[in-house]
Amino acid sequence: MGRITMEWDRLLLRERLGKNGKDIPERPGRSEFDSDIGRVTFSGAFRRLGRKTQVHPMAPNDHVHSRLTHSMEVAYVGRALGKELGRQIAGDLPRGYGPDDLGAIVHAACLAHDLGNPPFGHGGEEGMIHWFEINGPDIFQSLSGDHKRDLISVEGNAQGFRIISQTENHLFDGGLQLTYATLGAFHKYPWTSRKGEKKFGSFISEESLLEKVAEKVGLVSTGKSSWCRHPLAHLVEAADDICYSIIDLEDAVELKILPFEQVAEFFLGAFEGAQKRKIKKEFVPGNNHRVNLARLRSHIFDKAISRTIETYVDAYPVIMEGRYDGNILDLLDPTDPTFKMIYGAKMLGRKEVYTDIKKVEMEIGCYAIFDILLTDLCAAALNQAKVLSDSGGEAALSWKSRQVLQLLGDHAPTAQNAPRGGWSSYQCLRRVVDYVMGMTDNYATYISRQMRGTAFAGTQRP
């Protein structure tokens, strides 16, 4: 038997999650994948990224990237990668599909790739994990081992899939109701928390949905609740890596963590001879780091996009067989200037940018914020789970739990908005995580102060 190869007519499936095979309306001049872009762009979850940390929490400088500006830039690079791949493999695409379709799918998936990240960036994720690890033994007594591990493993990728497939716009009915092609391309880690790896793409609550997506688009199974990546997911990851490795250093210059001269010389090292001299001639004199970084960035992106596609095409047969789930950029020769530029930028960021003292101070502070939020929210969720599962009507909400559930608003578990299977303790706690991970930096700070009793009624509500 030959190797299993994925097929583009399934990988590019236009059918939508939650629509159950209903007819797709005609939209002259706009494909279903373009519609996916609109659904993500106009969602509340996407809008909130404007007040969520990319690297530097609550940075006072408006030129520093938020999750929103980062996602938009990743989407631009992703669309360029998708369209160029489409041109390279045009002969393999089914009739009626072209480079623009691949570009739009990657664009939509890139826009959505950070929707699940909590407030305060990576520090926020670690703060939530820390709280669950410390308090989990007390609050998870009624949960199974798999569900305990699932909740402790706060994971932005899995939360993002939950948002787009479950909770945003159509609660427990397909979420944003995106096409299966975009849902497949979104998955950087197409397996669930049951696999036991630190990174995963789906909580147990969305396990059946991940399985459905994998079956619909024809991903190759690699084990129980685990599949190979959609071929376009590699481009989403590459676009993210290209952008953050470069832009994080630009932000460091903006915040005066690194001097412009150091960052410029580092990136110019990826070019040689006449091209390097040409780029340097484009620089304007004086203290114009924003202009000069913008002019340098265009050359960096052109080089990174070109080398990424060349590398992808070389690995194309292995990717289509589902035998490569690593980073496309890892396939570059370590001596390749693009490899040294991207991975060198990551190393420089870890060494000199992510250790910035102001960033460290804010990240330590977020531990206290999550302690306040999760302590009361999880207690109320468990109280409500008892009430909803009590057929005899003996369980009751405490006054405080009632107030907390009112604060949760649409996220509060009720008899009217139950998921399939009803409200278990696990599902109620999952909705608390939805609420907290969906917060912006300033809203999390505001609510924690109110709950601690250190704010007052006249405080402006974010």
Image (cartoon, rainbow, N blue to C red):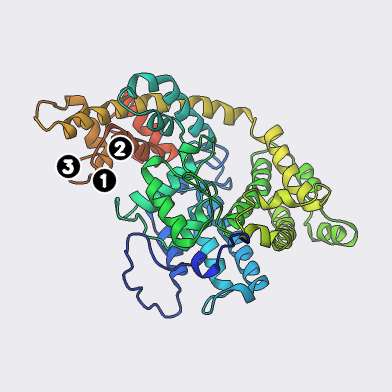
Q: Earlier in the sequence, mark 3 or mark 2?
A: 3
- Please say if 351 is above or below 24: above
- For the question of whether residue 47 can be seen, the reply is no
Q: Is residue 451 above or below residue 96?
A: above
Q: Amino acid at mark 1?
A: Pro
Q: Is residue 179 left or right of residue 276?
A: left
What is the crowding at mark 2: few (fewer than 14 residues within 10 Å), some, or many (at least 20)?
many
Camera-nearest residue between 211 and 28: 211
Instruction: Give the residue at mark 2.
Output: 427
Q: CA distance from mark 3 to mark 2?
A: 13 Å
The quadrant the N terminus occupies is bottom right
96 relative position to 252: left or right: left
| Residue on which the image places disc 3 | 415
> Hey, what amino acid is under mark 3?
Ala
The location of residue 406, given as percent across then percent down, is: 22, 36
Q: Is residue 192 above or below residue 453?
A: below
Whole-percent x, y for residue 319 in the image: 64, 58
Determine the secondary structure under disc 1.
Answer: loop
Give percent across and percent down for residue 31: 45, 73
- Residue drawn at point x = 14 percent, y = 31 percent: 390
Q: CA distance from mark 1 to mark 2?
A: 8 Å
Quarter placement of the C terminus: top left
